[in-house]
């Protein structure tokens, strides 16, 4: 009878008891840490580029950078603006309607709102519910709803804003005319008064028919 070597025993043991992988939450946390480190590195790159711009003109500097990195010159300009704290550098990493809006706000407010979970009131069958989203998750309409200048609207204010928008869309664009034109006749739907100018306009319309 053949004997099993210690080496073969170890292989068999590995097959029976495979190396246990980290659970999902641990693997996600590892990814998040890498992404956050990338954000920090990008902010440092913005500052390094701005320092280069102090010593060299863009016309000389940008072509040399773009030979190594496929970055548009307009994006390089925006990186320099971020380094000057006109807006947080992370807004360039997550382009979105929310990022575009926050870039126009004072630096302190943009930094605050880009880090916060923002309340978003959502209509549902029961009326309204409040969800929370990051700035890069907001749609264009949600940006209009959530922000009032550099201030974030609370749930109550957003509900009022949504109700006002509903009324605005429900209202007719213009008041219906008090008459219909059928063939060569003008049929008035209700008692009405027309000025001489309105009568002349009505006659012009009839002549064009």
Image: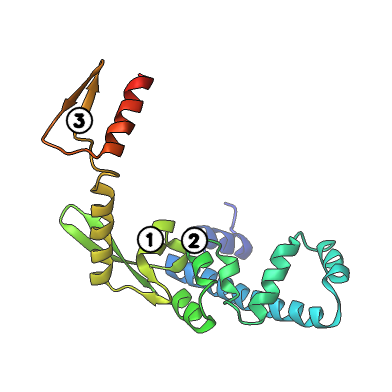
State whether residue 84 is above or below residue 125: below
Q: Tell me the quadrant of the picture where the C terminus can be found.
A: top left
Q: Mark 3 points at which residue?
A: 179
SS for tag 2? helix
Sequence order check, earlier mark of 2 and 1: 2
Q: Which of 187 and 158 is in front in this view?
A: 187
Q: Mark 1 points at which residue?
A: 142
Image depth: mark 3 or mark 2 in front: 3
Q: Mark 2 points at which residue?
A: 97
Pointer 2 and pointer 1: residues touching (CB < 8 Å)? yes
Q: Residues within 10 Å of mark 1 (few under 14, many from 20)?
A: some
Q: How far apart are marks 3 and 1 (CA)?
A: 41 Å
Q: Which of 87 and 205 is in front in this view?
A: 205
SS for tag 3? strand
Sequence order check, earlier mark of 3 and 1: 1
Q: How far apart are marks 3 and 2 (CA)?
A: 45 Å
The disc placed on residue 95 is none
Q: How far apart are marks 2 and 1 (CA)?
A: 9 Å
Sequence order check, earlier mark of 3 and 2: 2
State whether residue 12 is above or below residue 30: above
Task: Locate residue 184, reporting x and y percent.
Answer: 25, 16
Q: Residues within 10 Å of mark 3 (few under 14, many from 20)?
A: few
């Amino acid at each position: 009878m053949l004997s099993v070597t210690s080496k073969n025993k170890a292989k068999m043991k590995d097959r029976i008891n495979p190396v246990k992988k980290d659970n999902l939450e641990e693997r996600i946390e590892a990814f998040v840490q890498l992404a956050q480190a990338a954000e920090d590195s990008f902010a440092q790159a913005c500052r390094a580029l701005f320092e280069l711009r102090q010593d060299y003109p863009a016309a000389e500097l940008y072509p040399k950078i773009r030979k190594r990195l496929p970055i548009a010159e307009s994006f390089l300009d925006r990186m320099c603006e971020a380094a000057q704290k006109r807006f947080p550098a992370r807004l360039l990493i997550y382009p979105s309607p929310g990022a575009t809006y926050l870039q126009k706000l004072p630096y302190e407010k943009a930094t605050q709102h880009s880090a916060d979970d923002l309340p978003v009131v959502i209509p549902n069958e029961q009326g309204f519910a409040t969800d929370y989203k990051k700035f890069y998750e907001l749609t264009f309409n949600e940006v209009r709803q959530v922000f009032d200048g550099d201030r974030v609207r609370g749930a109550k204010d957003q509900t009022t804003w949504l109700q006002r928008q509903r009324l605005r869309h429900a209202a007719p664009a213009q008041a219906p005319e008090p008459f219909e034109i059928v063939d060569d006749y003008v049929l008035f739907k209700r008692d009405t008064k027309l000025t001489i100018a309105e009568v002349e306009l009505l006659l012009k319309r009839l002549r064009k028919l």
